[in-house]
Amino acid sequence: MRLCPYTKQREEIVAKALRSVASELRLIDAADLIALLRLECHSNLADLVASAAELFFQPGTVNFGIGGDYRLDWGSTPEVTLDLELKPEGMTVFARLTLLESHGVLEINHIAFDDPSPDPDENTAFLASSLQASAFAGNGLPPSVMP
């Protein structure tokens, strides 16, 4: 995504919302994720992402985006990157989640608002509220994912 003044804030909102999903995905052996990416077993990866997300979000909110990457070099820890599509009501967020040994890193590629506001702050607030509305109560998200 082209960096703009509100990119970092939006990435923080989405990263906080996906923290539990990333933790669930890190429970899967990195070698298995890498093998599925390498062998282009996209439907298997989609099932794993859906299973990790179903504990925290409404069905269909977090989806595998049919792509990914990995870094696996001698003497280093593996990194697995998964393309994700988040579809809370009113928008689609295209993001890349990189799973590292002890944490994840989220990068937003694009956000497509169904009915965007001319005010970027309103769009950011809508992103936070829409993600909160699509999450199950008690999933560990703070009452507002807005920083």
Image (cartoon, rainbow, N blue to C red):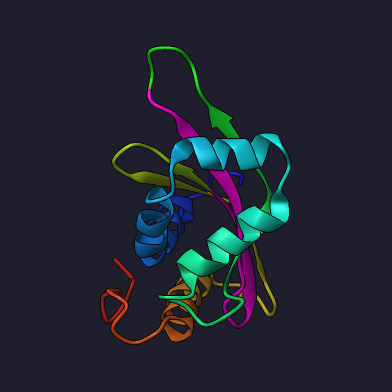
Quadrant into which the C terminus falls:
bottom left
Q: Is residue 135 left or right of residue 45?
A: left
Where does the magenta region start and end?
77-96
Q: Quadrant of residue 144?
A: bottom left
Q: How far from the left and from the top, in percent, is residue 131?
A: 47, 76
Q: Is residue 92 above or below residue 70?
A: below
User: Residue sitting at 37 percent across and 51 percent down?
Assistant: 27
Which residue is more in the foreground, 81 or 13? 81
Compare residues 59 and 15 and report the one nearer the observer: 59
- The image shows residue 97, relative to residue 80, as above or below, that is below
Query: Is 85 on the left-hand or right-hand side of 8?
Result: right
Q: Is residue 32 magenta?
A: no
For residue 110, say whether it is visible. Answer: no
Q: Which of the two residues, 33 or 94, is positioned nearer the viewer here?
A: 33
In the rendered image, residue 29, in percent from the top left (x then y), is placed at: 43, 42
Identify the residue at horizontal 39%, vertical 67% (top origin). Answer: 17
**Which quadrant of the figure has residue 115?**
bottom right
Q: Between residues 46 and 69, which one lies in front from this camera angle? A: 46
Is residue 26 at least partly visible in the picture?
yes
Is most of the magenta stretch helix, strand or loop? strand
Tally of marks:
0
